Image (tube, helix red, strand yellow):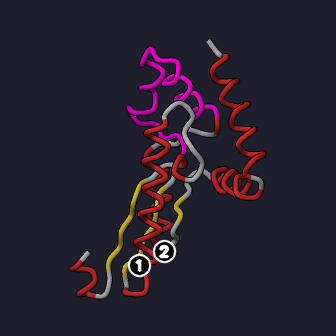
Amino acid sequence: MPGWLERGEGYFVGTASAAGLLTQIGSATYAVTKHAAVAFAEWLSVTYGDRGVRVSCLCPMGVNTRMLPSGEDSGDALGRAATRAVTSAGDVLEPAEVADAVLAALEDELFLILPHEDVLQMYRQKGSDYDRWLRGMRRYQSSLRAQP
């Protein structure tokens, strides 16, 4: 950060996952750390944005990486629910698609980089009626746990 401040410019891109805006069924540690990553990026933008430091925060849902199926193979019901929550909530994108979304967002200097367009709508629904969103997430979690 000091080099960026001395130059009066720099760009920080953090990866938080859609879980940073929404939550992660099946993993408290994942949900909490991703919320923290979004908060840190917000803080950087607020603190240093007027000093030339630009900040973006990548929040994809499912991306086809080796990490994605790990919960399904874990033998743990919460791990399976976590994987199913991601794979059933929307399209699973290829890493190259996410990279393209990042490059496009950086050109426009957008804070939130949302390769899955549905995430913005879900985030808006969460904010517009938090209690309704929580009830819906509990129902969704129950449906995932009921699957064999």
Label 2, on which residue? 109
Disc nearer the start of the sequence (2/1): 1
Q: Disc 2 versus disc 1: distance between alpha carbons?
A: 16 Å
Please say if 124 is above or below 86: below
Above/below status of 60 relative to 87: below
Which residue is rendered at x = 30% and y = 88% of the image?
A: 8
Furthest-front residue in this view: 131
| Quadrant in which the N terminus appears | bottom left
Stretch in magenta: 60-88
Residue 34: within the magenta? Answer: no
Specify the amino acid type for callout 2. Answer: Glu
Q: Amino acid at mark 1?
A: Thr
Look at the numbered disc 2 and give the secondary structure of its residue: loop
Residue 93 vertical position relative to residue 104 in the rendered view, above or below:
above
| Residue located beneath label 1 in the image | 47
Q: Secondary structure at mark 1?
A: helix
In which quadrant is the C terminus drawn?
top right
Question: Where is residue 125 drawn, in percent x and y?
Answer: 74, 53
Work out whether residue 12 or residue 44 is closer to the camera in this orientation and state it.
44
